[in-house]
Image: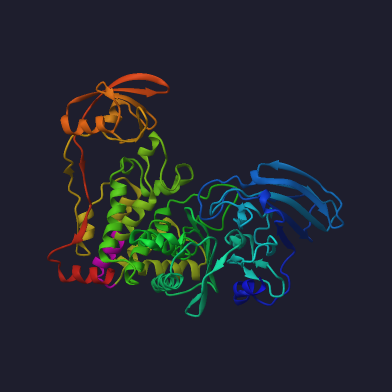
């Protein structure tokens, strides 16, 4: 166990005395209870009343989490162990009355049952800590340094994975210069596996995880190194001393951090070409985020307000561009083909355009309203009025890239914008950029007005895809084409004696007739509703023909008539132009 921990902590430990007067200890003697026991010692903090708070969200996941709901058995004592009076004055706030005590110790338990990158989890095999949901902060002291000592379950033999620096000579003790750094440094411990590390420009990179699965570990780490190298090449600087990929186990989701990322991971994905593409894009996305959103960031995203939503109109840049860049990074690393890059962008465009939300919500609105809508838009009927910045953002990133390359005769690109934002706002001014500053930087590098692209981002103006893709010598098929047969417009799940509607396409014949998600179709033109009856509609009925449906809505039977229609779709297939100009050919070559 010591040797395993040595491998993880020593390369980025440093010799110094214990930092600050705030110290946490987290133990987990009986992980079957799913309880972390937290001891928080606060020495030398003056005040007759001290307020302690827990964040309501965690950076990187733009949803309210209500972490305080999981706190149990809260107690406060002075330095001698004498109980102190305390009150819970709000959902995420505790007030302690130390009187003249120079030392205050808080103890509490945190229920950890959510196996998710933004949650906390603990069982007999591993423990995962999302720090915003475990560590209280004294109000007004977010900039205070602190230490965290972990006491892993005695039966675990694996390393501890975290981006925090370890304290030399103090096993399992880590230091954070402030709470922002702590909350940005998740921790994983348990029966873990550490893959062989690699260095880029002399900086070590680790991959540590739980239940990684069966795959070629050596090849995977070689590919991961290429992903890191390709990302670094875009910006030209590595701003951290060490980086850790923290794989919490199979599942879904990932969250970026300053010098680590928490990811759901299964090596089984590497068995297929499609699975490998998806996984490598995901890893490149989370890694590139340490630049784009953690350091190249909208001004609203740091310093954080942990008491409420932190809203920005710019997630289409912070998230969307971080979908776009992995396509190019993987292509240049030899991990994606040209056709796969075209296909990925095609899916982004189709996902955005084939949903009616693009008529109602802009990319800037989707960014600002993500706290209510979620990253992929709302569910239910209202879903038809929202979009995902994960779809429109990469499209706008590609079009901005093409426009800059075209206007500068291929001398500049979106890379120059990203580097300028990094150098100006992160390195020099040490702050985020405003929306106006972002566009000003883009126009400065492009040497021309970008009003049309600004409108595409901030309004629901129809996008002229062929114009922008042609800059890079590409054609995109945006022509509507009729789909053969008649069209009802539902997705469904077959039951024993009925069909359950799982989606009714917006403004489809089904939608206009009143079908919605959750509607049960009992009969179709008098026949039992099944796949065969629905297929017969397409074969025997023409657009304009009526179809009678007996449905169940709100547990009430109801007869409705839908008038079948004709569906048209745009494929948005992306191909090379057959006869590109010299500039178009040069841009395409440099882009890929």
Going 28% across and 68% down the picture, which residue do you hit? Answer: 591
Rendered view: 523 above or below 89 = above
User: Is residue 409 located in the magenta-colored stretch of the structure?
Assistant: yes
**Where is residue 426 shown, x and y percent of the image?**
49, 67
Quarter-of-image position of residue 508: top left
Q: Is residue 489 left or right of residue 147?
A: left
Q: Quadrant of residue 485?
A: top left
Of residues 156 and 589, the one nearer the viewer is 156
Please identify the residue farthest to the bottom as the structure is shown. Answer: 202
Which quadrant does the C terminus fall into? bottom left
Instruction: Write the start and end of the magenta stretch as one range.
Output: 399-411
Residue at left offset 52%, top offset 50%: 310
Indicate left or right for 16 with 181 as reference.
right
Is 482 situated above or below 245?
Answer: above
Q: Is residue 538 left or right of residue 243?
A: left
Q: Is residue 439 visible?
A: no
* Residue 247: x %, y % from top left: 52, 61
Asked if the stretch drawn in magenta spans residue 276, the answer is no
- Count the numbered circles shown: 0
**Residue at x 68% of width, y 41% of height:** 90
Q: Quadrant of the N terminus?
A: bottom right
Image coords of residue 293 (percent x, y): 47, 60
Asked which quadrant contains residue 324, the reply is bottom left
Image position of 561 with respect to 399: above or below: above
Q: Is residue 561 left or right of residue 177?
A: left
Of 522 and 175, the residue lying toward us: 522
In the foreground, 189 or 282: 189
């Amino acid at each position: 166990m010591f040797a395993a921990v040595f491998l993880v902590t020593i390369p980025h430990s440093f010799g110094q005395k214990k930092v600050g007067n705030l110290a946490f200890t987290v133990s987990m003697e009986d992980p079957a209870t799913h309880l972390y026991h937290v001891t928080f010692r606060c020495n030398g903090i003056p005040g007759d009343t001290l307020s302690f708070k827990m964040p309501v969200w965690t950076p990187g996941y733009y949803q309210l989490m209500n972490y305080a709901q999981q706190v149990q058995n809260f107690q406060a004592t002075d330095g001698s162990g004498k109980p102190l009076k305390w009150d819970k004055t709000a959902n995420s706030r505790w007030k302690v009355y130390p009187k003249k005590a120079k030392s205050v110790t808080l103890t509490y338990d945190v229920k950890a049952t959510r196996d998710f990158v933004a949650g906390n989890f603990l069982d007999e095999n591993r423990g995962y800590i999302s720090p915003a949901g475990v560590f209280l902060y004294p109000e007004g002291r977010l900039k205070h340094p602190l230490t965290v000592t972990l006491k892993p379950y005695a039966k675990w033999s694996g390393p501890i994975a975290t981006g925090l620096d370890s304290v030399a000579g103090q096993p399992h003790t880590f230091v954070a210069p402030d709470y922002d750094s702590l909350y940005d440094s998740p921790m994983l411990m348990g029966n873990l596996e550490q893959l062989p590390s690699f260095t880029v420009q002399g900086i070590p990179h680790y991959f540590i995880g739980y239940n990684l699965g069966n795959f070629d570990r050596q090849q995977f780490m070689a590919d991961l190194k290429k992903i890191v190298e390709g990302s670094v090449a875009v910006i030209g600087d590595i701003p951290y001393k060490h980086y850790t990929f923290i794989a919490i186990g199979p599942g879904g989701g990932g969250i970026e951090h300053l010098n680590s990322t928490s990811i759901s991971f299964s090596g089984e994905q590497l068995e297929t070409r499609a699975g490998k593409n998806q996984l490598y894009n995901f890893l490149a996305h989370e890694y590139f985020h340490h630049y784009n959103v953690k350091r190249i960031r909208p001004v609203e995203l740091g310093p954080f307000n942990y008491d409420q939503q932190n809203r920005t109109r710019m997630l289409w840049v912070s998230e969307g561009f971080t979908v776009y860049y992995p396509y190019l990074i993987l292509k240049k690393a030899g991990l994606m083909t040209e056709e796969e890059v075209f296909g990925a962008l095609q899916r982004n465009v189709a996902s955005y355009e084939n949903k009616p939300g693009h008529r109602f919500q802009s990319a800037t609105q989707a960014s600002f309203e993500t706290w209510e809508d979620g990253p992929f838009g709302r569910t239910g009927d209202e879903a038809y009025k929202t979009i995902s910045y994960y779809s429109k953002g990469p499209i706008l990133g590609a079009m901005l890239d093409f426009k800059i390359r075209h206007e500068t005769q291929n001398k500049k690109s979106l890379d120059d914008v990203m580097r300028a934002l990094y150098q100006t706002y992160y390195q020099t001014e040490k702050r985020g950029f405003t929306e106006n500053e972002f566009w000003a930087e883009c126009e400065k590098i492009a040497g021309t007005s970008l009003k049309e692209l600004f409108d595409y981002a901030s309004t629901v103006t129809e996008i002229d895809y062929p114009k922008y893709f042609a800059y890079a010598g590409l054609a995109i098929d945006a022509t509507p084409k009729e789909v053969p047969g008649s069209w009802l417009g539902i997705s469904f799940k077959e039951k024993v004696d009925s069909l359950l509607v799982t989606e009714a396409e917006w403004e489809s014949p089904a939608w206009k007739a009143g079908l919605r998600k959750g509607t049960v179709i009992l009969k179709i033109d008098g026949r039992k509703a099944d796949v065969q009856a629905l297929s017969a509609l397409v074969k025997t009925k023409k657009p304009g023909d009526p179809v009678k449906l007996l449905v169940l809505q709100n547990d009430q039977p109801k007869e409705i008539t839908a008038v079948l229609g004709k569906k048209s779709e745009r494929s948005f297939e992306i191909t090379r132009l057959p006869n590109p100009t010299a500039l178009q050919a040069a841009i395409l070559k440099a882009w890929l």
